[in-house]
Amino acid sequence: MSELLLDAQNLVKRYGSVEALRGASFQARAGEVTALIGDNGAGKSTLVKCLSGAEQPTSGKILLDGSEVVLDSPTTARRMGIETVYQDLAVAPELDPAANLFLGREIHRKGILGKLGMLDKKEMKRQAVEEFQRLGVTLQSTDVPIGSLSGGQRQSVAVARSVVWASKVVFMDEPTAALGVVQRERVLDVIKKVRDKGIAVVLISHNMPEVLSVSDRIEVLRLGKRVARFTGADTKLEDLVAAMTGALVQEEAA
């Protein structure tokens, strides 16, 4: 069994009188794609926010590499090796792919020019091209604003940016939403390459055939709590639907 990297135990999140998470647990392992699924209102977004530092749980524990951690901000999570690819991409459309890859982590030129704030664009482009090739990301051009690229290429850059900086876990929130068939397959190929690097990939998706095609494990949330866990290769679509709707509830494992 793969190494357990992320282990959330009995997370509760309250917003006033509303309880978005009611003792939710979740696990992600190194070198695996774990899908997090559930109907609207199941608590998926809240759980991901808690596990990526955007929100803090009201109670419960989060363990990373077996040690309890406090993810009090996205910056803290990134420092611990946790990155997130959001559904809205969060790319800078006027910048080229290399500049997007290094957004917030720019390389400055050496010497006095670097101290004056000048960037080493040549080195950033060299490293970016190398990373894109390693991940199998094919771009029509690395010299044009990312906003002029196709949706699949923009999404691939967003995925690559998180992967380059993540050392442990990458959350991917609906990474193929609104993409065509060819573009979707390209992004799924990148996800598999990320998994093969030994990173724990967490896929949040409403596309059940896609979940079954790429996931090693599947965890189901319903009404703010994990209600079922499956192994991807042994699961049928009707099993997932039954768990999401409440027709199937497994005894939760710790």
Image (cartoon, rainbow, N blue to C red):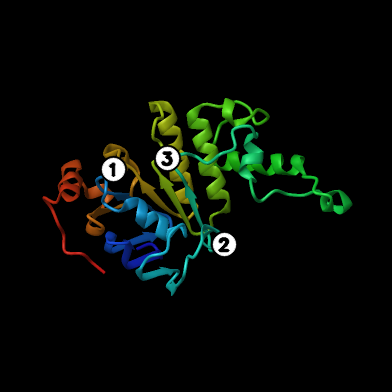
Return the x and y of residue 94 as percentages of the image width and height: 63, 32
Using the image as rendered, state which of residue 202 and residue 194 is in the foreground.
Answer: 202
**Is residue 70 placed above or below 177 in the rendered structure?**
below
Marks 3, 1: nearer the viewer: 3
How many labels were placed on the picture? 3
Q: Earlier in the sequence, mark 3 or mark 2?
A: 2
In the image, 157: left or right of 10?
right
| Horizontal relation, residue 96 to residue 88: left or right | right
Give how far apart the Cα atoms at labels 3 and 2 are: 23 Å
Please, what is the three-letter code of the amino acid marked with disc 2?
A: Arg
Q: Callout 3: few (<14), some (14-19), or many (20+) C-alpha neighbours within 10 Å?
A: many
Q: Is residue 3 left or right of residue 153?
A: left
Q: Which residue is mark 2?
A: 79
Residue to which mark 1 is pinned: 212
Q: Quadrant of residue 131?
A: top right
Give yes or no for contact between labels 3 and 2 (Cβ–Cβ under 8 Å): no
Q: Is residue 216 visible?
A: no
Task: Name the residue furthest right.
Answer: 112
Q: Which quarter shows the C terminus?
A: bottom left
* Amino acid under disc 1: Leu
Instruction: Give the quadrant of residue 241.
Output: top left
Q: Nearest the camera: 140 or 172?
A: 172
